[in-house]
Image (spheres, grey):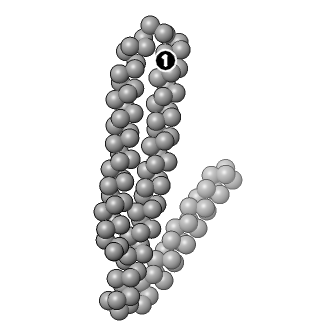
Amino acid sequence: MTTKLSKYMLAAMAALVTLMATSAAYAQAASPEVAKAENSRWYAIAAALGLGIAAFGGALGQGRTATAALDGIARNPGASDKLFTPMILGLALIESLVIYSLLIAFLLYGKVS
């Protein structure tokens, strides 16, 4: 029971900190020049974080896909033909999602300059 209560307390504290941080963010309006410089910085941070998270998620997905396919092949070597093609297709689709995030990062980088 105490672990459930501590989870609720942790969630409540996280919500409180988030609400306090957002109110400070909207405290003062900036001039247009400062706002443009701030936007450029946030675009760069968003591009970097988005690409890093996508690469990390893609690597995890590809690792799990290859592990599951190789486990299936190890258990039943006769099914290797049936597992290989869907595995390659899945890996290609996972990689395409990471490439899409790279494209979005390039688009955001174009907004910085």
Give the quadrant of the C terminus.
bottom left
- Residue 87 is situated, as x and y percent measured from the top left of the image, at 40, 26
Q: Label 1 amino acid? A: Gly
User: Around disc 1, counting alpha carbons within 10 Å, would you say few (fewer than 14), some (14 to 19), or many (20 or more)?
Assistant: some
Q: Residue at x 37, y 54 (%)?
A: 102
Question: Mark 1 highlights which residue?
Answer: 72
Residue 17 can be seen, yes or no:
yes
- Residue 14 is situated, as x and y percent measured from the top left of the image, at 56, 66
- Give the total of numbered labels: 1
Q: Based on the displayed image, in which of its 4 quarters is residue 50 positioned? A: bottom left
Residue 29 can be seen, yes or no:
no
Q: Secondary structure at mark 1?
A: helix
Up the image or down, 16 lies above or below 86; here it is below
Q: Residue at x 51, y 78 (%)?
A: 20
- Residue 112 is situated, as x and y percent measured from the top left of the image, at 35, 73
**Furthest residue in direction top, as rendered:** 78
Say whether residue 35 is left or right of residue 57.
left
Up the image or down, 21 lies above or below 94; here it is below
- Residue 28 is situated, as x and y percent measured from the top left of the image, at 42, 90
Q: Residue at x 34, y 61 (%)?
A: 106
**Furthest residue in direction right, as rendered:** 2
